[in-house]
Image: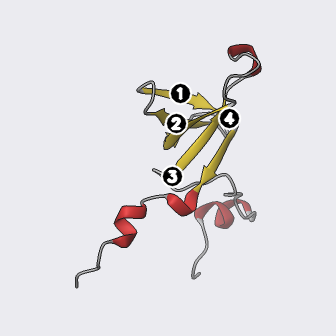
Amino acid sequence: MGKITPEKVFTGKTPKVIHFRIFGSLAYCLIPEEKRKKLDQTAEKGYLVEYSGNAREYRVYLPGSRKVVVRRDVKFMEDRAFGKSREMPFEE
């Protein structure tokens, strides 16, 4: 069978995984208009912790407020995920 997912074997359809992101990646969460004023910032900086139970919702840790929030409108900077660990030399 090779590299086939169980879902494709049972249903014949390839699963959609476009919403998967790297855990620990830098994330910017949109602050809803109801919770901000005209000159307030529009996004909060955080880190992806896990996926929520609903589709395309993410749990993001906000270090500024020390909270984990569930947000849907999130932009990810996956190239910055685990930057320190990628810089470390690999030992065999």
Q: Residue at x 57, y 45 (%)?
A: 27
Q: Nearer the viewer, residue 46 or 53?
A: 46
Are the residues flagged by discs 1 and 2 in contact, CB closer than 8 Å?
A: yes
Q: Residue at x 60, y 67 (%)?
A: 5
Left or right side of 91 for 18: right
Q: Position of residue 47 (x, y in %)?
A: 49, 43
Q: Amino acid at mark 1?
A: Val
Mark-to-mark CA distance, 3 and 4: 15 Å
Mark 2 secondary-structure assignment: strand
Query: Who comes first in sequence, dot 1 or dot 3?
Result: 3
Q: Position of residue 53 (x, y in %)?
A: 58, 34
Q: Nearer the viewer, residue 43 or 73?
A: 43
The quadrant of the image that shows the C terminus is bottom left
**Which of the 4 image quarters holds residue 51?**
top right
Q: How busy is the neighbourhood of tag 2: few (under 14 within 10 Å), some, or many (20 plus)?
A: many
Q: Amino acid at mark 3?
A: Ser
Up-down relation of residue 11 to residue 68 (above or below) = below
